[in-house]
Amino acid sequence: MLRRTIAALVWVSFAFATLLSLASNTDPKWYDYASAVPLLIVLIALIAGQDKFLIEELEGWLARLRGPKNVGPTRTTSIDHFKLLDSEIARFNAISGLVGPIGLLGQEALRFRSIAGTLKANGMLDNSSVDQRYITHILARSLIESFFWLTYIFDDPAQRQARYNEFVDSFKGEYLKLHNEQLPINAALPQPDAAWRQLPRAPDVRTMLGRLSNVYGNKLDYLYPIYRIASFDTHGKSLNNIVTSAFGGTSPNFPVLDLEFGFDLIENQYLHTLQELVNAGEV
């Protein structure tokens, strides 16, 4: 009913504009009158209820005017997913000791609950102060990256193990960088396997997100700026003192992530992944 009302209002507006044009025309021609005929037919169709095609066409026009469908998540529920995650923590703890991707899910859910829960309990997720991001973005950065990796790993059961191996290989690459710096602590660290030097490079976050799609078929690389913003603050060079000096006394409004909403999505996804494993009899 709402769609029919909107369609009717739009077409009535067109009809009114056409009739107004005719009324103000002191010497209308036959084609002026002919231009009003399609609109009259449309109005009759709307009144008679034979308007399904017209409404669909109108919605298509409106969609093109609005641009592509919103690819980002929106707030659609008041469910407290953190409480739900907390209620399932024993199950996450049980799988955390497993090897492979399922054990990774369990361990990361426990880590997420600890860090996100601490921020939540200390009132750090309400964005009441811009300065909160000096703490929240730094702590959230690793949670966001791990969330992207777990989404990538569990997106396709057929590729789960291969993608988990990519994650492990990414650690091997970072460990090699550390070991190659010849630090004094190297003597206390295990030697990397020589074969690690031949491993293919693991996908970076942007590439990884580009391989995933949401329910609308949109690539998830639109989420990359979230990770990048958190990474920017993580390097510790975004304090107001430094920023104002760099910009000549002014301070731009850097984005502040809505982590309360973001964490809710992460919690929901971890719960969903766990339930999928339960349904498949894997845990």
Image (cartoon, rainbow, N blue to C red):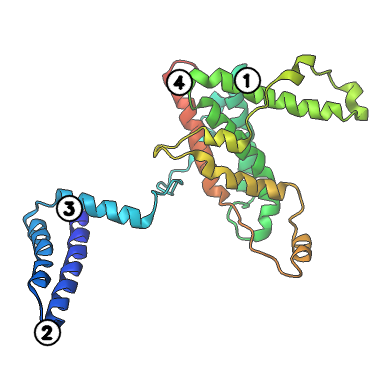
Q: Nearer the viewer, residue 244 or 27?
A: 27
Q: Secondary structure at mark 3?
A: helix
Mark 1, Cα crowd under 10 Å, few <14 / some 14-19 / many 20+, is some
Q: Secondary structure at mark 2?
A: loop
Is residue 95 among the parts visible in the rendering? no
At 56% from the left and 18% from the top, the residue drawn is 161
In the displayed structure, would residue 182 be above or below residue 143? Answer: above
The residue carrying mark 3 is 54
Please tell me which of labels 1 and 3 falls first in the chain: 3
Q: Please provide percent x and percent y for residue 10.
A: 21, 64
Q: Which residue type does callout 4 highlight?
A: Val
Tell me, yes or no, whether the two marked residues, 4 and 3, touch with CB atoms within 8 Å: no
At 64% from the left and 46% from the top, the residue drawn is 228
Left or right: where 188 falls relative to 240: right
Q: Please provide percent x and percent y for residue 140.
A: 64, 43
Mark 3, Cα crowd under 10 Å, few <14 / some 14-19 / many 20+, is some
In the displayed structure, would residue 197 be above or below residue 218? Answer: above
**Residue at the extreme right of the image, as rendered:** 184
Please tell me which of labels 4 and 3 falls first in the chain: 3
Q: Secondary structure at mark 1?
A: helix
In the displayed structure, would residue 67 be above or below residue 250? Answer: above
Q: Secondary structure at mark 4?
A: helix
Tell me, yes or no, whether the two marked residues, 1 and 3, touch with CB atoms within 8 Å: no
Is residue 107 among the parts visible in the rendering? yes
The residue carrying mark 1 is 165
Q: Which residue type does callout 3 highlight?
A: Leu
